[in-house]
Image (cartoon, helix red, strand yellow):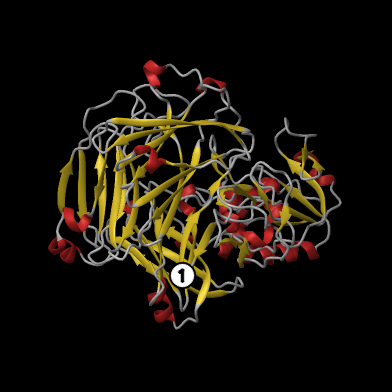
Amino acid sequence: MLGIRTFDPRTGGNMAYRALTHPLAAEKLAILNHALAEAGPVAIYDPHGMAETILPLLPVPLQVAELYTHDSLRVGQPCCGQVLRALADLPASTATTVWALDFASGIMENRLAGLMPPGGTLLTLAPVRLPQDMLSVGHHYLDRLNFGTNFAFFRETEEFSTRLVTANYWARYGARDVRLWLRLFDESGCVLHTWEQPVPKGEQAIVLDSAEIRQRFGLPAFTGQLFIHAIGIAGHDVVKYALETRGKGANASLSVTHDANAWPANRYANLPAPAPGEDVVLWVQNSHDLTIPAGTMTLNRMGCDEQVAISPTLAPYQTLAVHVHDMLPDLAWPAQVEFRAGGYVVRPRYEVTRGARTRIAHLNVQRADLQPDPGIAGLDPRFFGRGYLLPFPVPDPARYRTLVVPAPMAESLTSLPVRVDCFDQAGQAGPARFMGNLGRDHASMLDAGALAGSAGHAELVYDFCEGGQADGWLHALIRYEDRMSGHVAETSFGAHIFNTAMTYRGEPQSYAGPPPGLSTRLFLTAALHEPYSFCMLIYPASGPWHAMSDTQLSLHAAHGAVMAEERLAIPLSGSCEIWPHEVFGRAALEIAGKGAYVIIRDTTCRLFGYHGRRSGDGRFSIDHMFGF
């Protein structure tokens, strides 16, 4: 296990980790690491508590003579196999090299000028810094906006093509002259190409097409990952996007998935075991300039501690296809698999092949910090109604099956007491079914379409009629099967408290400002040709709220300008389908151009949406939307 705390929901992201693992910085860190290793035992001064982050990232282990701190309250405490010593005692060190873990060499030189051991040489992290023109906030190196980065699964082969789509949402917060620094790695982890792409216009569309990139740079076919660094940004330090995967020629595959979580985790869930006739591939992509030792990462049935090791060694940035059936041959859908990644990979994707079609979806982070919260069972219904809800679409049951599999999403959770509530498109409550107080290793599945009996949406909620635990991180995998075409798509997400005046532990969640989150801004692509873009927009409510939404749809041209606007009203607990080519008309989309998109905005309530694409031959995709 890499053993680095990369992100904590309470304190945010570890920016030292982000700064040190940027591919450019990692190259420089390796050079510095070799120089330090050749210097012999090293005394380390750790002014910012970065030792536990940086030492595991070194490709060559160091001989650490002593570890020093200026914090008198930390002296004598253990850290990285050492006992922290007082910085005042540094002159007595026998080490000839002192490594100060700070990116500002001048500050360290001044601070340590009278404390260096005789003949000692001072090194800092200054050689690892990114160039100044790659910083969004030049005066503060570890500012979160300097490391707006993410990875994307990226592929261009004879069978498949990928397309990353987003917008310059940083312009809304005052950013100017945004540009992307991009590095493409192939399957073996080798760099195929590095380039920059300007995003000069406010709120303009961003489209990274694997076919166009391959042709532009004369690249071979590839299956790997794209590293994205957004420079000159403001407001958000996360690179959010939708990723489309399409089959070529006669290959009818189609998937659209999203990613907004760029922090590696120790465990991931929502990986389904294969159904009969399926091949489930977990795409393991090394996110570091480090070798992952053989057997470090494992798979196990959810709720079972017997782990099966992923045996190959992974080179830096390598992509590896792991076939779940080969690892766990006796496991079948709807059982779930836990991926113990050890902090080496950003949220991975999996690909399911059934017949001639494939589908891609993402795993979700399994949290290590959460414990069951007894307060959830006692939430006052006057304030929070039905509490935490996970809303999801239920398309016409005559054509589609909607299969729901609840998923544990915290390492500590041992039970899932859940119920499914159904609603029609007008918001009228329909049937409900208690799925049980499910164990961590459950293999229970519910056809929500068959339960509902008509199109609309359903909500997974806690139900403590038979006891059980809750942690507020309720998740499920939802699979959609087209009875006519045989096409399948799936998505996974978690529950929130929606549209209540009172708050509980950060809920209703807000992506812009403190809770309660009572507004909406969602991103939807707008396609002029098949497969058409669509979204299923849901107005979930834990308790009473506004009878109707007041929702604005704004069509943006590829260069960012608003071309047209429409309004709609969704009933409380209701839903609707939105097709941009029908709402705005083909002529408007033609003028808006390739890369046009729709912003869904509501200042009166928090809506939840699922986006996708669908064509007349039955191909479709679906995943939850992202906002900013």
Percent position (x, y) of residue 57? Answer: 68, 56
Percent position (x, y) of residue 479? Answer: 45, 50
User: Based on the displayed image, in which of its 4 quarters is residue 63 positioned?
Assistant: bottom right
Q: Can residue 626 be seen in this view?
A: yes
The residue that mark 1 highlights is 356
Badge 1 amino acid: Ala
Q: Which residue is drawn at 74% across and 62% down?
A: 294
Q: In this view, does 330 lie to the left or right of 269?
A: right
Q: Vertically, is 333 above or below 212?
A: above
Percent position (x, y) of residue 506? Answer: 45, 29
Which SS class for mark 1? loop
Q: Residue at x 13, y 64 (%)?
A: 587
Q: Vertically, is 355 above or below 4?
A: below
28 and 250: which is toward the camera: 250
Q: Which residue is drawn at 32% across and 49% down?
A: 398
Q: In this view, does 553 lie to the left or right of 336?
A: left
| Few, some or many residues within 10 Å of mark 1 (<14, 14–19, 20+) | few
Q: Vertically, is 481 above or below 450?
A: below
Q: Can residue 258 be seen in this view?
A: no
Q: Vertically, is 188 above or below 476?
A: below
Percent position (x, y) of residue 544? Answer: 30, 23
Q: Residue at x 58, y 27 (%)?
A: 469
Q: How many marks?
A: 1
484 and 65: which is toward the camera: 484
545 and 464: which is toward the camera: 464
